[in-house]
Amino acid sequence: MAETLFSLDRRNVRECQKLFRGERSQEYYLGDYWLDEGPSVEVKAERKSVGPISIIRMTTSPKSYFRRTRQHIREDATDLAVLWFVKRGSLGLSNQCGNKVAHPGDFAITRSMSPFLIECNVDEEGVNQTLHVTVPTHILRAHITRDFDTGLFLHCERPEMAIAENLFTDVFEDDGNLTPDSARALVDCALQIIGNAVKADSEGIATRQTIADRRLEEVLRFIEVHLSDPQLSTTMVARGCGISPRYLSFLLRLKGTSFSELVWEQRLEKARSWLTATDARDISISEIAYGVGFKSPAHFSRMFKRVFNKNPREYRGLADNDAGHDETGIALP
């Protein structure tokens, strides 16, 4: 359930600089925070923490500002990125790269290690509302490869951004029914979706798939769906996808593989993951063997040991003992 990070009205507005980071000054980072003078003051920031990530919904009246200077950075080297989704009003962003304004539907990132000024401008009804997400920069870099050292600004209404915003909102509004692991999975999914959207924007992807691309997707999907069938063959796949076996071989060469290599690689890798993630009391090695398309547990055991240098039982034992698993490469027979 979300908690109040800070709340301001006319009685305590002059303490905004002291209050904006929460009771223990543990949220955000050092900076200057202030509001315009106005006949009324209503500011509320609510927070939902998910591991090291915070989802914050802030509603502000009147106009407010936040400034991060080089002096602040010298005094507090906390490296956080903030993902901004504008709900009402607009968001003015000024930094060494210039000035930009984000409206509802736009997306922006600020980073604490680069100076900036944020202006939260109210709408015609005198309200500004943002949903913003604070993410340690080293976590965000795993999802966004594009440079955002001085921030990032996208004028876009990509469907990925709307989906990511909805995921963050659902986690924020959850009243405790989600487990911590589920909440973190949803947040990680939202970050990955944002990374995909940023990549697509930077590459100008409105790219149309070629016929070969679409056919290859159909082939890979068919193989994934039917991977557990020990009778899976080029003839079966070609017939199911409405292409010739020769064209199937051509499509897989585009991917740099052959049918046999692809199928055995997927079967062994899925079996390895299954062994790592399950207990012998839940599912037996024989069930795993049949589940990934082997005709017999003996055949599965021989091929698995040839690739991973351990038989399935030994490998599962290592997983149960929390041993490292560095045998991820697959050398096919």
Image: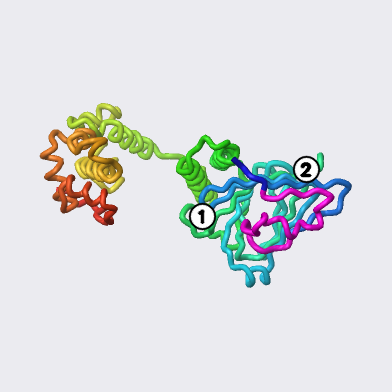
Residue 26 within the magenta-colored segment of the rendering: yes
Q: Amino acid at mark 1?
A: Leu
Side of 307 relative to 60 (left or right) = left
Q: Is residue 84 above or below residue 125?
A: below
SS of the residue under disc 2: loop
Give the mark nearer the N terminus: 1 vs 2: 2
Q: Is residue 269 above or below residue 29?
A: above
Rounded to the nearest angstrom, the CA distance separating label 1 from label 2 is 30 Å
- Quarter holding residue 96: bottom right
Residue 140 disc label: 1
Residue 327 can be seen, yes or no: yes
Tell me which segment is drawn in magenta: 5-32
Q: Which residue appears farthest toward the front when viewing the image? A: 23
Q: Amino acid at mark 2?
A: Val
Of residues 198 and 85, which is closer to you in this image?
A: 85
Q: Is residue 141 above or below residue 72?
A: above
* Image point (50%, 37%), residue name: 178
SS of the residue under disc 1: helix
* Image point (67%, 55%), residue name: 23
Circle 2 residue? 127
Please state the horizontal and vertical placement of residue 253, each as a whole percent of the image: 26, 45
* Image point (72%, 44%), residue name: 59
- Quarter holding residue 28: bottom right
